[in-house]
Amino acid sequence: MPTQTTQTLTASSADLARAADLLAQGESVAFPTETVYGLGGDARSGPAVARVYEAKGRPAFNPLIAHVPDIETAQRLVMWSHMADRLALAFWPGPLTLVLPLREGHGIAPLVTAGLDTLAVRVPAHPTARALLRAFGGPLAAPSANPSGRISPTTAAHVLAELGGRISAVIDDGACDVGLESTIVGLADDTPRLLRPGGLPAEPIEAALGQELVRHHVSDTLNAPGQLLSHYAPKATLRLNGEEARTDEVLLGFGEVYGDLNLSRNGDLTEAAANLFGHLHELDLTGRPIAVAPIPDHGLGAAINDRLRRAAAPRDS
Ligand code: TXA
Ligand code: MG
């Protein structure tokens, strides 16, 4: 139930100062990143983080990513390693999250990690996210700015449609370039693990590490505790690998499988990733079941298929 007025702010420095003020008061503010819109709260404040969980209706065992402006800030929060250094130098700022052991004196509210002794950290590339982090001057816990279990938002309009009235403000700075959440790599022990495929394909990460990432099955909730199977779900049912629409269905196309909307007519996976959540939102508004064309499983296709499998997974009620 909406209980407050959600302000729409711009990326001007005056508005970012306003957003930083709200965050300092413990309020939740949605902001753009290069991947998806995040719902930010002060990661050092239990009540502020609780407000983020509350707005999302998120199960409390699902830990959040701490967003920081640079490597040095990340190093104050977690125990850094050689592998972390390689990946951060190669891919930060950018759509990569690293999970590392918490460092003593980290100051992060336990609600952020849902009681784990590791922390997910990332340095976003979006200039507005970076400007906000600088204006705020602290780490921001920021899950995707959607109600728990729903499609991630790639525009401020998506955020307002589902969280309007439940958060203090949204910074509107257009559509997100990548359109998929960050790739999460676990570096808590000697074995680098792909905890969530995402906006940075696994192949370049493995090239930078000089070794393969250990992959986990999509239903393995043990190592990525927040990876609920039915997640990113539209309201409609979803059918994968549809070559054509059956009765009643709307078809989300890819390449030559044309569809009512097409993720990328040229079969370009980067374009498809950027369009994925926006197109799902749009088709969901028709109220009809959605069929999705087959997507190749390499590069960003692996992350797109991961999201689609979750969206198609059986859910309660
Ligand atoms: O691109 C992104 O990562 C976006 C933008 C806003 O930065 N954020 C995002 O956050 O996708 P969220 O909360 O929707 O997803 C965070 C994921 C969850 O699946 C959670 O389980 C995992 O990160 N995670 C967080 N902390 C973890 C930890 N300590 N160990 C393992 N997984 C963790
Ligand atoms: Mg999410």
Image (cartoon, rainbow, N blue to C red):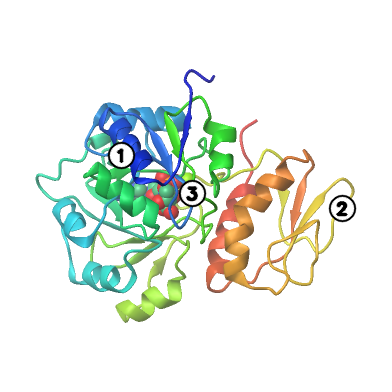
* Residue 235 locus on image (x, y percent): 68, 38
Q: Residue furthest right?
A: 247
Q: Tell me the tag on residue 53.
A: none
Whether label 1 lies within 8 Å of ligand 1 gets the answer no
Name the residue at 53% across, 20% down: 2
Q: Nearer the viewer, residue 238 or 134?
A: 134
Name the residue at 26% across, 45% down: 135
Tag 2 and tag 1, C-beta contact below 8 Å: no
Q: Quadrant of the N terminus?
A: top right
- The residue under label 1 is 17
Depth-wise, is mark 2 or mark 3 nearer the camera? 3
Q: Is residue 267 left or right of residue 197?
A: right
Q: Amino acid at mark 3?
A: Asp
Q: Nearer the viewer, residue 312 or 41?
A: 41
- The residue under label 2 is 246
Q: Amino acid at mark 2?
A: Arg
- Cα distance between the residues tagged 3 and 1: 15 Å
Q: Quadrant of the C terminus?
A: top right
Name the residue at 38% across, 73% down: 205
* Residue 138 locus on image (x, y percent): 22, 44
Q: Is residue 134 visible?
A: yes
- The residue under label 3 is 173
Earlier sequence position, callout 3 versus callout 1: 1
Q: Is residue 63 visible?
A: no
Q: Compared with residue 165, is residue 197 higher up or lower down, i.e. above or below?
A: below
Q: Amino acid at mark 1?
A: Ala
Q: Is residue 312 left or right of residue 35?
A: right
Earlier sequence position, callout 2 versus callout 3: 3
